[in-house]
Amino acid sequence: MTKFITFEGPEGAGKSTQIQLLTDYLTERGFAVHTTREPGGTSIGDQIRAVLHDVHNTEMDAVAEILLYSASRAQLVAQVIKPKLAEGTMVLCDRYADSTFAYQGYGRGLDMAMLKQITAFATRSLVPDLTIYLDLPVEEGIRRKEIANQAGEGELNRMDQQEIDFYRRVRNGYLTLAAAEPRRWLIVDARQSIADIQREIRTRLTAWGITPANG
Ligand code: TMP
């Protein structure tokens, strides 16, 4: 069974930690797993990421922004995600198209129908089997990000410099997206401990017959 699983949520919600723990769990159960991230995940994608996240690029147009995220995604789908899934490797991706719907759609207010069209083109209509949303109140996400920055951890990027209402729209957007497709989404309260979050994720995988006993 080969599955494509994406992780969404604000910075500071613990996506990378949970991806690592889930990778270990699946690997122990004999699955081949590839982890990747957006924007990036390929050489071309990483170059696009540098442009997108450069704090000096304050003049970036919102349409240019969505096209750059989509270009990075198109490259990742074609070069990595589709071939990995075709060879039977599970793919875990840190952010995917739902970030575009949440940040550029709900956050920036771009036309959602247009974003869906561009996204379907960029992804060749590849939709995740499961999207795990690590949900945090906006203030808590900002607090965690500040603590990480003070500790010299994590990157401070252009998308971290929006006003607070932008992040409120993004969070409400994610919750709206999840409510519209409850079978694809798992919403997890990211204020829980790392272990409890991981337990909820693993419980969801039992629907696919992946259980703690399979190891
Ligand atoms: P991260 O790598 O630290 O998660 O940062 C990625 C940032 O880029 C994050 O603020 C969300 C943003 N983003 C978008 O706005 N649209 C997108 O399509 C993607 C993939 C990310």
Image (spheres, grey):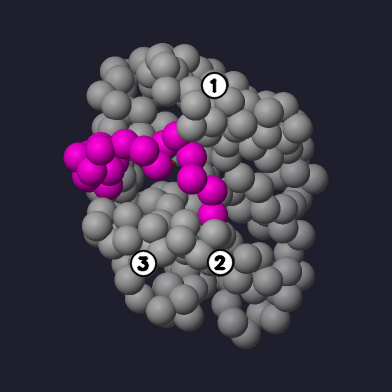
Magenta span: predominant SS is helix
Where residue 68 is drawn, which disc sits there? 1
Q: Does the magenta stretch include residue 159?
A: yes
Label 3 sits on residue: 190
Pointers 3 and 2 in contact (CB under 8 A)? no
Please give the name of the residue rendered at 54% of the width and 21% of the height, measured from the top-left corner: 68
**Helix, strand or loop status at disc 3:** loop
The one nearer the camera, 140 or 186, is 140
Above or below 180: residue 14: below
Q: Position of residue 26 (x, y in %)?
A: 67, 68
The one nearer the camera, 75 or 126, is 75
Q: Which span of residues is magenta-colored? A: 154-173
Please give the name of the residue rendered at 70% of the width and 81% of the height, measured from the top-left corner: 215
**Helix, strand or loop status at disc 2:** helix
The one nearer the camera, 16 or 179, is 16
Q: Does the magenta stretch include residue 147?
A: no
Ranked by sequence position, the earlier of labels 1 and 2 is 2
Mark 1 is surrounded, within 10 Å at the Cα level, by few (under 14), some (14 to 19) or many (20 or more) other residues, namely some
Q: Position of residue 137 (x, y in %)?
A: 25, 59
**Helix, strand or loop status at disc 1:** helix
The answer to whether the beta carbon of the residue marked 1 is less than 8 Å from any atom of ligand 1 is no
Label 2 sits on residue: 17
